[in-house]
Image (cartoon, rainbow, N blue to C red):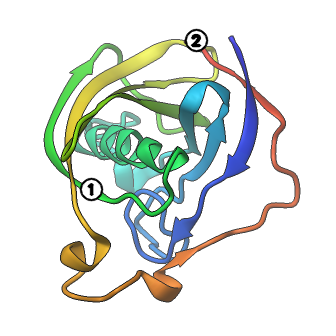
Amino acid sequence: MKFKVLKKQNNSHMCFVCGIHNESGLKTRYYELEDKRLLGVFQGEDIHQGWPMRMHGGIIAALLDETIGRAMQIDDPELWSVTVELNVKYHKPVPLDETLYVVGWITGMRKRIITGEGYLCDNKQHILSTATAKYYKQEVKEIIDGKESLGEEWIYVDEEKTPLFFELPK
């Protein structure tokens, strides 16, 4: 299926998944797509491996958790949460030597609990991992010890050319 890019989301300075200054991180770029899906684009490196040339399962879980959790900000950029539960299924080995895609979307939103789903796929649209997750809504100041906002930690990173569409399996 072809999905249109509506907007690019912010990155952070040091987040493991999206931090642009974290030398060990994945530097994932996030795009809001039509159909209220969030897409992350990244490529693993040798420092992200478990078995040789395969991404570590914990890193796969982190990618799915971050992506599903950030999908709630499509409708409300000020909405924050913490993970309550994450269930990951590993279908195929995840390579380190190619661009990969992680997709998340929200499946339910109650007063304090948000649920979502997601998957990780390769550039041939093979689904490599899937996940379901549950999050607890929380004010950002509660998450970051009383600060009112993330300030300069949460930044928009411009790109020379933002893609217009992405072809994804679902």
Question: Residue at 30% of width from left, 45% of height from top?
Answer: 59
Q: Residue at x 69, y 69 (%)?
A: 157
Q: Secondary structure at mark 1?
A: strand
Tell me residue 74's x, y (percent).
Answer: 54, 45
Residue placed furthest toward the left: 84
Above or below residue 23? Residue 54 is above
Q: Residue at x 65, y 70 (%)?
A: 156
**In-image side of 69 versus 122 (left or right):** left
First along the sequence among labels 2 and 1? 1
Disc number lying in front (2 or 1): 1
Kindly give the residue lying farthest to the front in the view shown: 111
In the image, 50: left or right of 76? left
Judge by depth and name the residue closer to the eye, 118 or 137.
Answer: 137
Callout 1 crowding tier (Cα within 10 Å): few <14, some 14–19, many ≥20: many
Against 151, is 90 above or below?
Answer: above
- What amino acid is at disc 2? Pro
Number of marks? 2
* CA gap, disc 2 and disc 1: 28 Å
Q: In this figure, which residue is indicated by the disc labeled 1? A: 81
Which residue type does callout 1 highlight? Ser
Residue ID for mark 2? 169
Q: Quadrant of the N terminus?
A: top right
In this rendering, position of residue 76 left or right of residue 141? right
